[in-house]
Amino acid sequence: MHRKVSLFILLAIVLALLMPVAAQDGPRIAVLLPLGNNEYVRNAALGVQSVVEAAGGSIAEYDAGFVLEEQINQIEDVITSGDFDAIILYTVDGVGITVGVDIAHEAGLPVIALDAAINPDRKTLVPYENVAAQIARTGDGDGSQIGQAIVMACEGMDMCEVAFMIGFEGFPLDLDRFNAVEDVVNMHDHIEIVAMQAASYTNEHGFEVATDMLQANPGIDVIATVGDQMTLGAELAVEDAGLTGQVALIGQGASIDGYNAVKEGRMFATVANIPYTNGQIAGQMALQAIAGELYVRSVNMYDQAPPFPPSGPIITADNYEGFEPQW
């Protein structure tokens, strides 16, 4: 699949062309992933691989099974092996993982944060002191974009009732997203969130939760979620309720399925994520850190246009032609 290249990557490629060609035994980078079999995560890893292998290096992947303690153990294993020049860390928990980052820093291994910011303060994109660099977003940033999409969907309505789904109860990132959505929505008197529930990031639970929400709140105008999977499940619930075309659907991620639903007019919007580009940027940061030539320490995922269209990451019927899904 052809992927548009961000301005950051274009600059990095130019600089890489000016550097000597790496030997076959080039930089070796450990890539620590939260869930190795997740399609979004896999494409982030592929982005890393494309940049590192092009520079003559190699990667080794570790799957934490979404367990923080396992990810910290993996950092220790990477250090003990002595086989790696850097760590790219797609963390399970950006707050709790700081313990492992400190261990890597003490061992002299630069850590690059991928997709998930690492800091005791979850709401900042200022990297943790022992993180060499990061390409990331925050829950606040995600929620702000989803909130803006809700405002767009409610435009022109006297009153707009919104139902919202997070992924997991108590998951800090999801709570940050919902709080940011509330902050945006509360600036508009005609918009009210009438229901909020977790739906486990699956179509099945999205369908079940949306069915209950529609029965309890028959006046719902918008259903928004933090994941396209749940929104596509909600689409089936809307169909079953005979409300197709009457309830606007909003997702997050711009997966191929979510993107196509927007393209076909079945979803109002999806907030795009760009895992492959994130991986490319993280890979380039790791190579720069190894060479001692790191020139950008923090990159906000939502500033990457391209691959986002000029209007930003909220993908609707008006701008979908300017974006290609990356997972």
Image (tube, rainbow, N blue to C red):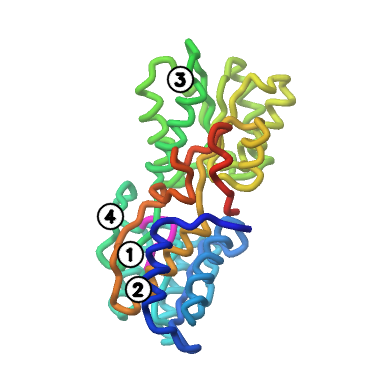
In this picture, which residue range is highlighted in magenta?
Answer: 112-117
Q: Mark 4 points at which residue?
A: 126
Residue at 43 percent across and 82 percent down: it is 27
Q: Mark 1 points at which residue?
A: 133
| Sequence-earlier tag: 1 or 2 | 1
Q: What element carries label 2?
A: helix
Residue at 33 percent across and 79 percent down: it is 291
Snapshot quadrant of residue 143: top left
Measure the C-alpha gap from mark 1 to mark 3.
39 Å
Q: In this view, does 116 lie above or below 12?
A: above
Tell me the crowding category of disc 1: few under 14, some 14 to 19, or many 20 or more residues within 10 angstroms, Cα based.
many
Quadrant location of the N terminus in the rendered image: bottom right
Q: What element carries label 4?
A: loop
Farthest top residue in view: 158
Q: In this view, does 172 lie to the left or right of 256?
A: left
Measure the C-alpha gap from mark 3 to mark 4.
32 Å
Q: Position of residue 74 (x, y in %)?
A: 46, 74
Mostly what secondary structure, the magenta segment? strand
